[in-house]
């Protein structure tokens, strides 16, 4: 009985999978997306990128949840967060995750970058993915900066004031950029609206496609250092070293090291002719 | 592509395409750009400010008698901000809050002091007649004497805008910024730390009844535009 149900279930799921695969190619796609060979050595370091992605996904999910209660106006922003913290079910948890995951995100993104840097993963043909990664880093930094003002408490308020004043010292662009962020020349209701628009709409919308490009380029070239490429590169390196040492000897005394006897033989042959 | 090459672009095509492209491009980009850059245009190009600071926009700080002889005292003034909450009429009709948004600004008032060598404070320049002044009408000469010696200082540090506070020391004292340790003396002059100048001074006036009024306007040095208090 159990056996029959099991085999029927297997048949059904096989049928559904095949049906979907024929019409959408989803199974091949999933295989393509989900499996990626990474080197055995230091494999854990390769999870840093996924950890970054994970925290960003958390930011999106918890951020969208917070939006159900958060009110972006100067007279209600603080109150609405207070409501989230004191009355909304699991409010402390949702906001806490958004807050802590934002902090972890910046740590993890730094470690991820360090890993890529020290393993030389930014080298050809992966330079563009490094560039895209830097764009992502900058976007995340601005997201963290703009999110902090949304609390509209003394911490967030003054941190943003000082942050913007630091920016205002940049030559030429400083003033206009700060006026753009402030929505005028003092911090006020317009500032909160702008930070809200930037934090919740503009930057997430820009971030998402860049993450897409980052992952596409990753899949295109594979993780740097996967075993195949590693042995490939080693073989190429050895070959180059061999050729170089050969050339060096030839330049030094005109006598190739390995080929000395060969040449002598050949010369002998020529003599005979 | 191949079609285009076989059929070379004429001058007329080129020009009309160029003109049409420019017009379309302008229609697509100018409105959104101007929409979000409005405040930059108003502030940087037209020189407008969000805090009304014209010749009529005086705000009362306090009475001249409230400023102590030997140390500064802080007052709080609410400057209204005309940002996006402009249309108060609609808010009244919809029964919502009609409260204006204000920037609460802390203002330090102090009597100018003589600065001795080594930074100690000498005599205070507080006008002597204030010793037995009880709120009566001041003469023009008295007002001028007060205005020559009263310092009305913004609490916003000239470095990056943290609020400075008065620290009492043996006999003297100083304004200390909590953020990076900027120090100013009782006159608001620069003493030490990262700030590029002394504390910002408000434009103020003293009226006949001995009350002090300020405008949201500062002593910004010409050519040192970066020092402008962008955020106060
Ligand atoms: C990489 C992405 C993001 C980062 C680094 C980030 C960072 C932050 C930070 C640091 C805060 C202040 C939290 C606090 O101090 O309590 C914040 C608040 C907030 N964020 Fe994000 N955020 C991100 C994405 C998002 C997204 C995608 C949304 C919505 C679609 C969102 C919505 C909000 C809201 C509504 C708040 C205000 C509530 C609060 O302060 O707790 N965030 N964010
Ligand atoms: S903000 Fe006052 S010293 Fe930096």
Image: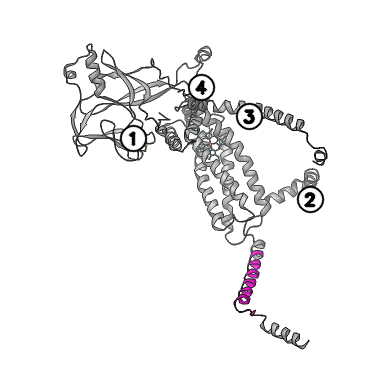
- Mark 4 highlights which residue? B84
- Image coordinates for residue A73, horizontal then vertical, percent: 50, 25
Instruction: State whether residue B36 is above or below residue B196.
Output: above
> Range of the magenta residues?
A232-257
Q: Chain of mark 1?
A: B
Q: Secondary structure at mark 4?
A: loop
- Image coordinates for residue B134, horizontal then vertical, percent: 20, 14
Mark 1 Cβ inside 8 Å of ligand 2: no
Q: CA distance from mark 4 to mark 1?
A: 33 Å
Query: Disc 3 vs disc 2: which is toward the camera?
Result: 3
| Residues indicated by labels 2 and 4 sit on the same polypeptide chain | no
Mark on residue B182?
A: none
- Mark 2 highlights which residue? A7
Q: Earlier in the sequence, mark 4 or mark 3?
A: 3
Q: Are marks 2 and 4 in contact (CB under 8 Å)?
A: no
- Mark 3 highlights which residue? B29
Quick check: which quadrant has ligand 2?
top left
Q: Chain of mark 3?
A: B
Q: Nearer the viewer, residue A168 or A159?
A: A168
Q: Secondary structure at mark 2?
A: helix
Query: Disc 2 vs disc 4: which is toward the camera?
Result: 4
Q: Secondary structure at mark 1?
A: loop
A220 in magenta = no
Q: Dot 1: within a 10 Å radius of its alpha carbon, few (fewer than 14), some, or many (20 or more) residues? A: some
Q: Are marks 4 and 3 in contact (CB under 8 Å)?
A: no
């Amino acid at each position: 009985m159990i056996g029959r149900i099991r085999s029927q279930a297997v048949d059904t799921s096989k049928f559904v999978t095949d049906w979907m695969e024929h019409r959408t190619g989803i199974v091949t796609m999933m295989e393509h997306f989900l499996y990626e060979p990474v080197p055995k050595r230091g494999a854990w370091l390769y999870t840093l990128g996924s950890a970054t992605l994970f925290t960003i996904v958390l930011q999106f999910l918890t951020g969208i949840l917070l939006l159900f209660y958060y009110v972006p106006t100067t007279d209600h922003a603080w109150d609405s967060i207070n409501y989230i913290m004191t009355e909304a079910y699991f409010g402390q948890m949702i906001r806490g995750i958004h807050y802590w995951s934002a902090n972890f995100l910046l740590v993890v993104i730094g470690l991820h970058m360090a890993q890529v840097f020290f393993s030389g993963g930014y080298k050809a043909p992966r330079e563009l993915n490094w560039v895209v990664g830097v764009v992502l880093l900058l976007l995340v930094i601005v997201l963290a900066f703009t999110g902090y003002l949304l609390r509209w408490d003394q911490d967030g308020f003054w941190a943003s004031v000082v942050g913007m004043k630091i920016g205002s010292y940049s030559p030429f662009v400083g003033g206009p950029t700060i006026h753009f962020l402030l929505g005028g020349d003092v911090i006020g209701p317009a500032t909160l609206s702008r930070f809200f628009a930037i934090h919740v709409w503009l930057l997430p919308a820009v971030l998402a496609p860049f993450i897409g490009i980052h992952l596409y380029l990753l899949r295109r070239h594979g993780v740097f250092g996967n075993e195949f490429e590693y042995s490939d590169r080693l073989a190429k390196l050895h070959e180059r070293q061999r050729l170089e040492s050969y050339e060096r000897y030839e330049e030094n005394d005109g006598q190739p090291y390995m080929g000395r006897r060969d040449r002598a033989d050949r010369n002998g042959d020529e003599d005979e002719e | 592509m191949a079609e285009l090459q076989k059929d070379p672009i004429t001058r007329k095509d080129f020009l009309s395409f160029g003109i049409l492209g420019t017009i379309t491009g302008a229609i697509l980009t100018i409105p959104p750009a101007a929409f979000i850059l409005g405040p930059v245009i108003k502030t940087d190009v037209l020189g407008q400010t969000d805090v009304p600071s014209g010749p009529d926009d005086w705000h009362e700080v306090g009475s001249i008698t409230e400023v102590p002889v030997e140390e500064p005292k802080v007052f709080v003034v609410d400057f209204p901000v005309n940002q996006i909450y402009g249309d108060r009429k609609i808010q009244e009709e919809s029964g919502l809050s009609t409260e204006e948004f204000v920037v609460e600004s802390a203002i330090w008032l102090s009597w100018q002091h003589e600065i001795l060598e080594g930074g100690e404070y000498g005599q205070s320049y507080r006008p002597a007649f204030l010793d037995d002044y009880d709120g009566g009408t001041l003469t023009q000469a008295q007002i001028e004497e007060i205005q020559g010696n009263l310092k009305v200082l913004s609490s916003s540090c000239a470095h990056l805008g943290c609020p400075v506070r008065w620290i009492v020391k043996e006999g003297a004292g100083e304004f200390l910024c909590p953020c990076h340790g900027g120090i100013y003396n009782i006159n608001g002059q620069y003493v030490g730390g990262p700030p590029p100048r002394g504390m910002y001074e408000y434009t103020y006036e003293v009226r006949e009844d001995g009350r002090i009024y300020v405008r949201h306007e500062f002593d910004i040095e010409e050519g040192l535009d970066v020092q402008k208090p962008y955020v106060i």
